Image: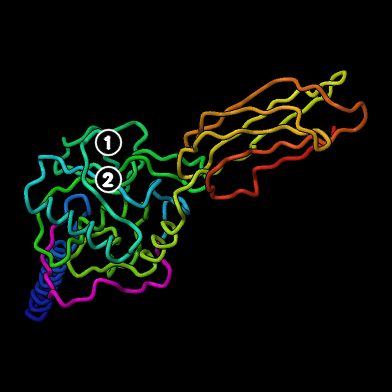
């Protein structure tokens, strides 16, 4: 082989080795700054004066539109396997959401009654078959039948302590519990890979304000009514549901024919997301055409009172 060929070969090998080292260094650098949200490795610290909020132009979305807990005052329980800093960082995350939304508040309760369970190991809580989780935090039980889908339970698992000025990991998982998807913008707290320099999204806070501005009220309505005329009687099957955010109190529904009351029924109350069906006959006061009106009478506020009346001709 000629001398100049040997020199060219040596130069090419050197360039290949140099390129390989650059690739390895880049991969190492990226791994130092970003990791999977389940087990974050956080290194890039920033000052206390950094603002917590940014605007990412409406990229924040929920798993289901309007998804929320029944009440704006939400209970939580922190498992004993969480060390002091993990627990305090999660409580800082709760405080940030409280202050930023001015609609949501949190309070500690016992493990059985808590709506949000917080653990710090994979063994903290067993996985349910109906688990609905993004990363290591999210709702675990949801009622989607209601007007606003309701989160019944949620869980957060925190693995490692971090040294960030803001509890970004805890906020990330808490926001999943509150119903939010990931956002594909690296500067936001809900980016799939966690880093210390991430911030809350203004649009996400606005969604929480709007959703929790709705008062926690029942919403009773006639979800299905069938009436058949049979020899001077009205054969009725009536279903009443509560698709609101709260259990209803005692209420009654009345049946009228041509403005004359022909039946009344008292119901002890309905849990949100449930319904009741009644089937019975009522004598009609007129042999001709009858206009049947059904009316729910509830002595409390509801999300919507306009759906409490149904009229049918038989």
Left of 249 or right of it: where is 136? left
Q: Is-magenta flag for residue 98?
A: no
> Which residue is pictured at 70% across the width and 20% down the height?
280
Q: Is-magenta flag for residue 50?
A: yes
Query: Given the current orientation, which residue lies at the most extreme right position?
Result: 288
> Which residue is pictured at 24% across the width and 33% down the height?
112
**Residue 151: horizontal and vertical position, in percent?**
38, 44
* Quarter of the rendering containing residue 122: top left
- Alpha carbon distance from label 1 to label 2: 8 Å
> Which residue is pictured at 44% across the width and 57% down the height?
211
Left of 175 or right of it: where is 287? right
For disc 1, the marked residue is 113
Residue in front for this viewpoint, 36 or 222: 222
**Residue 146: horizontal and vertical position, in percent?**
51, 42
For disc 2, the marked residue is 75
Compare marks 1 and 2 and give the one earlier in the sequence. 2
> Which residue is pictured at 40% across the width and 66% down the height?
206
Q: Which residues are magenta?
A: 41-60
**Residue 234: horizontal and vertical position, in percent?**
79, 24
Left of 273 or right of it: where is 76? left
**Vertical side of 234 occupied by 19: above or below:** below
Residue in front for this viewpoint, 86 or 270: 270
Query: Given the current orientation, which residue lies at the most extreme bottom position?
Result: 4
* Quadrant that contains the N terminus: bottom left
Q: Secondary structure at mark 1?
A: loop
* Quarter of the rendering containing residue 96: bottom left
């Amino acid at each position: 082989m000629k001398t100049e060929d040997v020199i060219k070969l040596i130069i090419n090998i050197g360039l290949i080795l140099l390129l390989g080292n650059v690739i390895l260094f880049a991969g190492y650098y990226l791994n130092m700054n970003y990791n999977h949200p389940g087990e974050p490795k956080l290194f890039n610290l920033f000052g206390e004066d950094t603002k917590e909020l940014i605007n990412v132009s409406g990229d924040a979305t929920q798993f289901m539109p309007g998804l929320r807990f029944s009440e704006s005052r939400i209970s939580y329980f922190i498992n004993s396997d969480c060390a002091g800093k993990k627990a305090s960082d999660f409580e800082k995350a709760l405080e940030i959401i409280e202050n930023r939304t001015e609609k949501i508040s949190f309070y500690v309760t016992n493990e059985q009654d808590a709506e949000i369970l917080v653990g710090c190991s994979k063994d903290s809580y067993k996985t349910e078959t109906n688990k609905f989780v993004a990363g290591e935090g999210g709702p675990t039980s949801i009622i989607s039948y209601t007007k606003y889908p309701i989160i019944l339970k949620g869980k957060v698992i925190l693995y490692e302590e971090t040294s960030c000025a803001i509890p970004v990991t805890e906020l990330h998982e808490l926001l999943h519990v509150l119903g939010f998807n990931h956002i594909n913008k690296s500067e936001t707290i809900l980016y799939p890979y966690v880093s210390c320099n991430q911030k809350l999204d203004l649009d996400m806070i606005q969604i929480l304000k709007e959703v929790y501005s709705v008062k926690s009220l029942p919403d009773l309505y006639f979800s299905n009514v069938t009436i058949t005329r049979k020899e001077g009687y009205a054969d009725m099957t009536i279903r009443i549901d509560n698709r609101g955010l709260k259990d209803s109190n005692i209420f009654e529904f009345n049946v009228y024919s041509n403005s004359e009351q022909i039946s009344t029924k008292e119901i002890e109350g309905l849990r949100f997301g449930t319904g009741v069906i009644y089937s019975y006959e009522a004598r009609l006061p007129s042999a001709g055409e009858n206009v049947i009106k059904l009316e729910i009478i509830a002595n409390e506020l509801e999300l919507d009172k306009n759906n409490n009346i149904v009229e049918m001709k038989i």
